[in-house]
Amino acid sequence: MAVDLGKTAKERKIKYFLISYTDLFGTQRAKLVPAAAINEMAKAGAGFAGFATWLDMTPADSDMFAVPDPDTLIQLPWKPEVGWMAADLFMDGKIVEQAPRTVLKRQTEKAKKLGYELKTGVECEFFLTAADGTTISDGADKQEKPCYDQSALMRRYDVISEICDAMLALGWKPYQNDHEDANGQFEMNWNYDHALITADRHAFFKFLVKSVAEKHGLRATFMPKPFSNLTGNGCHAHVSLWRGKTNLFEDAKGDLGVSKLGYNFIGGLIHNAEALCALTNPTVNSYKRINAPRTTSGATWSPNTITYAGNNRTHMIRIPEGGRFEFRLADGAANPYLLQAGLLAAGLDGITNKRDPGKRLDINMYTEGHTVKGAKKLPLNLLDALRALESSKVLGAALGDFVPSYLKLKSDEWNAYARHLTEWERETTLDC
Ligand code: ADP
Ligand code: MG
Ligand code: MG
Ligand code: MG
Ligand code: MG
């Protein structure tokens, strides 16, 4: 065996390991394995009934085995005697292709063959709420423009600093924390890295934030739009593509310092945006963040159109400086692995087919959007996005068998929602 985890456990005083995987809906599933059993378990994999989680399987299917990736080992900062590892799924001796981490690995392998490595950084906004999730946790956090509110930030210093300390110790190189644009909302930033590393960290970050919040008697949510009058939880991704030590998106002579290849990548995201929404905005609630009316702070900070601009936060893509761009579409419900896989699949399509992103729109899209003819709108709901993914030849071919599995489960979710009788319907239809 390559890594003796039993020995690691002794050296690092780990009593238990969490062998963890992320299912199609982004939920983390795990088995808690005592250190004495870890070497056997790591070889054979921890057993799961796949159907019992959000995967396209049946109760009659064989056991599924989660084989941990020792490179991802993290001792829980709030309980160091437990070591967490991301795992890959196997069934009947074969890798499970629909598993999100594998979906991403397939894309990074494809990119590697073409000589590319995707590097990204994600900005995972979240709210700190009361334990029951119905209100923000800080009654004094009431400003109309609460962004960067120093006092509100410091009233949550104990939670934020505990999370940041953990990231420092893990070597993620966090560099800033702030109060965001909604009352009760925060963001913590760490350095970008290879897409798979960022996805594993993104998954763990959500676990970390929720766990530390709980420890302090609060609750953390990444829900895209938990409060309809407040700015929602985005999950912006900053993107660059590398060959060795060279950032291929960098070109001092290119518009805004971005290379032709970079614009082709952007062209791929623009070409595939509607279908991509099914991955980057994967819940019914996601569509209440995008295409939303103005929030109490003055702006939603989320896109409505499939457009790009320079250093301007009213579009789907923003180019803040040369050598990278920011994809502002994704939200807090995005599956960390599928977000990166979708970005890469769409971007590689852009490069392969030399997609033209069209004209840069250096306007305030919220107030001047109507002056632009033909600016494509984002899907208005999850069903439109699922249909776009279903009919997308590009993403269908790039992401393979994962797509029908994902669509099946997500369509069931949409149908469950459609069957739900809402108060709004009652109010508007009772007197029909
Ligand atoms: P903003 O709020 O202005 O959108 P943040 O500072 O919150 O930006 O987040 C920026 C993210 O982009 C960080 O994760 C950072 O590491 C990442 N980043 C910076 N440069 C690059 C790059 N060249 N490629 C990919 N990600 C990058
Ligand atoms: Mg059992
Ligand atoms: Mg930010
Ligand atoms: Mg933000
Ligand atoms: Mg951002």
Image (cartoon, rainbow, N blue to C red):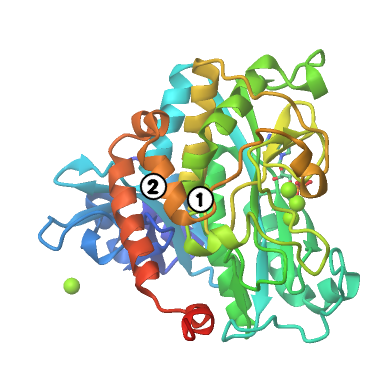
Q: Say if 125 sits above or below 70 in the image.
A: below
Q: Say if 353 sits above or below 83 in the image.
A: above
Amino acid carrying label 1: it is Pro
Query: Which quadrant is the N terminus positioned in?
Result: top left
The image quadrant of residue 53 is bottom left
Query: Is ligand 1 closer than 8 angstroms to the Cβ of mark 2?
Result: no
Residue at the limit of the structure toward the left, as seen here: 60
**Would you say residue 115 is visible in this rendering?**
no
Residue at the limit of the structure toward the top, as seen here: 253
* Residue denoted by label 1: 336
**SS category of the residue bearing label 1:** helix
The residue drawn where x is 61% and y is 34% is: 119
Residue 26 image position (x, y, % from top left) = 44, 58
Amino acid carrying label 2: it is Pro
Q: Earlier in the sequence, mark 1 or mark 2?
A: 2
Residue 192 image position (x, y, % from top left) = 66, 41
In the image, 242 versus 324, the foreground residue is 324
Q: Can you tell which mark lies on residue 221?
A: none
In the image, 282 versus 32, the foreground residue is 282
Q: Say if 426 sits above or below 38 in the image.
A: below
Residue at the limit of the structure toward the front, as seen here: 432
* Residue denoted by label 2: 100
The image quadrant of residue 101 is top left
Q: Say if 113 sits above or below 341 in the image.
A: above
**SS category of the residue bearing label 2:** helix
User: Disc 1 and disc 2: Cα gap in Å?
Assistant: 8 Å
Whether residues under marks 1 and 2 lie with C-beta atoms below 8 angstroms apart, the answer is yes
Residue 254 image position (x, y, % from top left) = 78, 16
Disc 2: CA contacts within 10 A as few (<14), some (14-19) or many (>=20): many
